[in-house]
Amino acid sequence: MTAPQPPREPGLLLRLAAPLQSWGERSHFTEERDTAAFPTKSGVLGLLSCAFGRHRGEANDDLRRLGLTVRIDRPGYVLRDLHTVGGGLAVEDTVRTAKGGTRAAKASTVYGHRLYLADATFICALTCQDDALLGRCADALTTPRWPLYLGRRSCPPEGPVLLGHSPDVLGSLLRLPLPGQAPVPAVTLLADRPLGWLPRHPEDPDDGTRPSSEVQDEPVDTSPHRRAFRIRQLYRGSWHPPEHLYTSALGAAYLKALAAHLHGATAPSPNSPEAAQ
């Protein structure tokens, strides 16, 4: 019996890794800012918008055409941080109220919690049949107009975000080396389309062909005071990588192994200098 193969589609491979990252899912200017356990679509498109230098509320209809598949290489763990704003300042200099007024002296300090993912690593595949759009996105990520961050401005990536531009990005996603040593529990993949092309394992509880949940992270309006998001279905699949994909290393050693793999496995952006040679 022939093993299933991922659909052959062009796309970009992104590596989202940092000491801290945070992908807000539900909170909006509340005392506790949450984080999803994986990069949200609104967060990834926000990162691309930042690379293009687009302001909040600026049209992103082109980016909304991108499909998103996330490979969770390292889930990390949730870190809670206490934030205080406005303490020790004169009343007129403290945080304004929602109506634009000043706060009373005894309420001048605002407390809140911020949740982060610590020590997490994700590989994202962005798919689209418009190769010109993918090329523009690749160029923007290579030379971003504004500094990139993973969910919040306090979370810069630990290195280059763009891994490459591939004509078979989902196949490339299953060929990228993984950090660590086999055997490990199954690697989780999340996507906005069915994952029936993943190789099956007898212990897998689901084949990824049916939605496992819903997330409200499809951006509709990103204006600062009119943010709106559409619900999208989320497909979850389990993948048991072959042992040869594990590098048995972390940190710089893994990055060297990843770079060595990409040197021969992933095509450069069609607009890049390498492609012109």
Image (cartoon, rainbow, N blue to C red):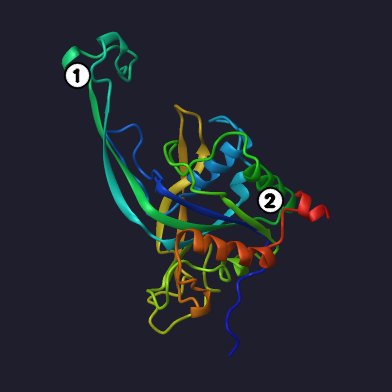
- Check disc 2 and report the residue beneath it: 134
Q: Please name the amino acid that badge 1 sits on.
A: Ala
For residue 63, which quarter of the picture? top right
Q: Residue 190: x and y, percent?
A: 47, 62
Locate the N terminus by quadrant: bottom right
Give the residue pinned by disc 1: 107
User: In this rendering, does residue 191 appear at all?
Assistant: no
Q: Residues within 10 Å of mark 1 (few under 14, many from 20)?
A: some
- The residue at the point 40 percent across, 64 percent down is 212
Q: Quadrant of the C terminus?
A: bottom right
Front one among 197 and 14: 14
Residue 114's x, y, as percent?
A: 30, 39
Q: Amino acid at mark 2?
A: Leu
- 168 and 243: which one is in front? 243
Q: Look at 24% across and 14% down and name the residue there.
A: 103
Residue 172 placement, left or right of 90? right
Is the residue under label 2 in contact with that under label 1 (CB below 8 Å)? Answer: no
Q: Residue 30's x, y, as percent?
A: 30, 33
Q: Label 1 to label 2, Cα distance in Å?
A: 49 Å
